[in-house]
Image (cartoon, helix red, strand yellow):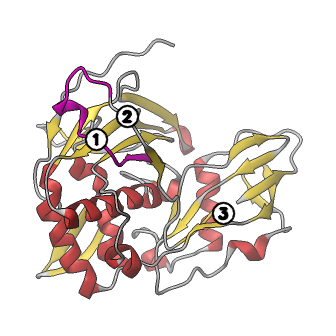
Amino acid sequence: MILRDLADTARPIRPEDCHGLLNRWWPQSPEEHTAAKRWVMNGWPSSLGDRLHHWTLTWLDDDVPPPLSPEELVGEPQRIGDHLLVPLSVTRTFDRTYARMLTEPRGVSAVRSAKVRSQTPVVMTTRDASGERIPHIWPNPRRLFGAVHRSGGGIVGGSGAVGAVARFAPSALADSWLELVFDGMAQVRRAPLPGEDVRLAEHHHADNRTVLGWHGGLRLDLTGGERRHTDAFAVLLELLELTGVGKYTAQGFGSVRVDTVTGGRPSAEVPGRRRRRSPRRVARRAPQRVGEARPRAVAEVEEFGGALFD
């Protein structure tokens, strides 16, 4: 979406303001309000200059359309905190169904590497020995891709990239595709991006709360597997941008940019040699998606650990 701000002076746009607006556009029933959303905010409205803002959103559900289409709001001022923003245009930049994503043949080049960079803080937590939640940075691939929750032998929910497939893709396709991911992604390796260290970040949120997350970049390499595994890896990379990463993705946290590399061998296998790179921008929307010195993180390449399924 491209929006024009009508406010002369106003406090900065906050994540909670955006979340409140989308809860009015796309409400859930009271009993479902605290459940996982069918939509994702890919960050917050970002200024383009001259009072123009750009905002990207994702609707995740193929079968249930959004209660209100953003195209219907063009020309109608929308309140976001102290701001009145008028949608000027809405462009769908990704409109493929889950069935197409999971079954269509990929291009001739197998995707085995990608650079992942955060655009907003990515919120992840883990429990220490006392059971207290602490911020988790430098995540392993399993945390990046999300989780699938099972109960009684069936899928009951999920989060992130794999969770979107589990919740919204046709079950006949989702089950076998998730098993393929479980099998192939054990060969995903994670490495740092030089000069783009993962670091702890604070974000001031509503009610004087501080949200702790991480900012930075990392590289993912698929070091083995067959062509079907590289195809599944490519779908996962698309979904990382579409669904976001970590917690609070419905409030704009966890927005990432993914740039794939389709040629050459992982740099870890060819030390000291500069590779030719062919970055390709991954499409940035899901089934319906509308448009000081700091401490250096200490990290090492880590292999994929644990199952994808919680």
From this view, report whether residue 113 is shown above or below residue 66: above
Q: Of the residues under marks 3 and 1, which one precedes in the sequence?
A: 3
- According to the picture, the residue beneath numbered tag 1 turns out to be 264
Check contact, mark 3 vs mark 2: CB within 8 A.
no
Residue 277 shown left or right of residue 273 in the figure = right
Check contact, mark 1 vs mark 2: CB within 8 A.
yes
From this view, report whether residue 222 is shown above or below residue 193: below
- According to the picture, the residue beneath numbered tag 3 turns out to be 21
Q: Residues within 10 Å of mark 2 (few under 14, many from 20)?
A: few
Residue 290, quarter of picture = bottom right
Residue at image position (54%, 73%) is: 95
Q: Of the residues under marks 1 and 2, which one precedes in the sequence?
A: 1
Q: Residues within 10 Å of mark 1 (few under 14, many from 20)?
A: few
Q: CA distance from mark 3 to mark 2?
A: 44 Å
Residue interval drawn in magenta: 258-274
257 vs 126, nearest the viewer: 257
Check contact, mark 3 vs mark 1: CB within 8 A.
no
